[in-house]
Image (spheres, rainbow, N blue to C red):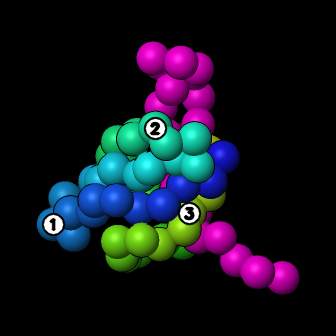
Amino acid sequence: MQATVSRYDTETGAGVVLTDRGVELPFTAEAVAHTPVRLLRLGQRVRLTTTGSGATLTITEVHFITLR
């Protein structure tokens, strides 16, 4: 799943993304901690790893989108 960063707190490492389907999803610092991502900026495109579905959808990892 891909999304755009809509809010990010540099102090806590948590934030919110807006998915391509128009749904806002929060993420915790733990979703970033185990990835190479160290700083996100507003408007940045990211790829998400998630678990669950519907109301229980949870972001487990946030990754940069890289062009190859």
Q: Earlier in the sequence, mark 3 or mark 2?
A: 2
**Total label count?**
3
Cα–Cα span, label 1 and label 2: 24 Å
Task: Quickly name the residue at label 2.
Answer: 23
Q: Which residues are magenta?
A: 50-68
Q: Is residue 8 visible?
A: yes
Which kind of residue does numbered mark 1 sit on?
A: Glu
Which residue is the site of mark 1? 11
Q: Secondary structure at mark 2?
A: loop
Would you say residue 3 sits in the magenta stretch?
A: no
According to the picture, the residue beneath numbered tag 3 turns out to be 46
Identity of the residue drawn at 65% across and 70% down: 65
Residue at x-position 84% and y-position 82%: 68
Mark 1 vs mark 3, foreground winner is 3
Look at the numbered disc 3 and give the secondary structure of its residue.
Answer: strand
Would residue 38 be found to the left or right of residue 65 on screen? left
Whether the magenta-drawn stretch holds residue 57 is answered as yes
- Residue 46 x, y percent position in the rendering: 56, 63
